[in-house]
Image (cartoon, helix red, strand yellow):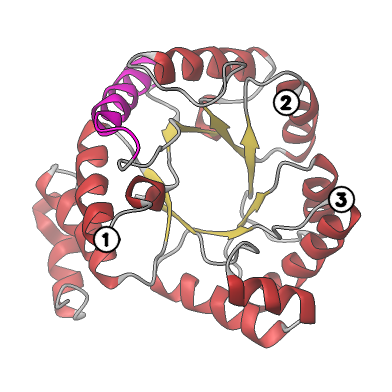
Amino acid sequence: MIIIGELINGTRKHVKEAIASRDEEYIAALAVKEAEAGADFIDCNPGTIGEQESKDMQWLVETIQAATDKPISFDSPNPEAIQRGLATYSGEAMPMINSVTLEPGSVEKMLPIVLEAKVNVVALALGEGGMPTQAGQREQVAQQIIDRLVAGGIEPEQIFVDPIIAPLSTATEVGQHIFQAIAAVRDYCPECHITCGLSNISFGLPNRRLLNRGFLSLAMQAGMDSAVMDPLDEKLMAQIIATQALLGEDEFCMNYLQAYRAGKLDV
């Protein structure tokens, strides 16, 4: 399971304040905590706009890199901010760009950046019609964007398809639509990764972490192998380990046993 730590996001109150005040200690500590908890990528989302976002992206990348060698996921709809982040990045591991869509102009703007930087890219199943609402829409858009990216020179292994997680509170059948889309994308492009913004599923509902854990296991069963999530949620991390064992992805349950001995399952 490829875990993209979600916590360094300028839409979160304390992170927003830390970015504005240039609180390196707070951001660095958060990056270290995510890395130590098991994050494979550190998401970096300034949450600002325009030139300020580019400046904030550069500062965040410098701060995160000084604290951990985990690759960064540059999370912004602003190509200039992403380019500033990539220019600042000096890590050895391949970073990630979040994201590209089938909305007009998105692929055209982002494809040259992805090709030049040789990075992973999150591909949102979002087309001209906006947020998918019907069964079958997610996989249809996802297949189209995979084809566009591969035809443009991107290797399938670099593509992280995001089927767009809508809140369960707004659409009762959204979980089934997403699981269907994940399975379809996995069949269509076995080499691609499938990710999601995990906590979106529980937005607006109580006991959100319970729903996040249940959704994650079902999505993994359907074929999802990545998630933008909170790696500091110990119960969620334990759920991943248990689910991988149950799905036959942990030979002789060695990872499960190792995690048990380390106290990671005692949550």
Give the number of the mark in front: 3 or 1.
Answer: 1
Determine the residue positioned at 20% across, 71% down.
259
| Comes first in the chain, label 1 or label 2 | 2
| Comes first in the chain, label 3 or label 1 | 3
Q: Kindly identify which residue carries mark 3.
A: 50
Three-letter amino acid code at the position of disc 1: Pro
Q: Residues within 10 Å of mark 1 (few under 14, many from 20)?
A: few
For label 1, the SS is: loop
- Residue 190, image quadrant: top left
Give the number of the mark in front: 1 or 2.
Answer: 1
Q: Is residue 216 above or below residue 56?
A: above
Q: Residue 106 got which mark?
A: 2
Q: Residue 206 got which mark?
A: 1
Give the number of the mark in front: 3 or 2.
Answer: 3
Asked whether, in this view, residue 142 is left or right of residue 267, the answer is right
For label 3, the SS is: helix
Work out how far the residue at label 3 is from the one at label 2, CA to CA, in angstroms. Answer: 17 Å
Three-letter amino acid code at the position of disc 2: Ser
- Residue 52, image quadrant: bottom right
Q: Provide the residue span drawn in magenta.
A: 170-189
Q: Nearer the viewer, residue 47 or 157?
A: 47
Asked whether, in this view, residue 83 is left or right of residue 232, the answer is right
Q: Is residue 162 magenta?
A: no
Give residue 126's position: percent from left, percent from top: 55, 25
Three-letter amino acid code at the position of disc 3: Gly
Q: Is residue 200 above or below residue 129?
A: below
Determine the residue positioned at 38% across, 21% down.
185
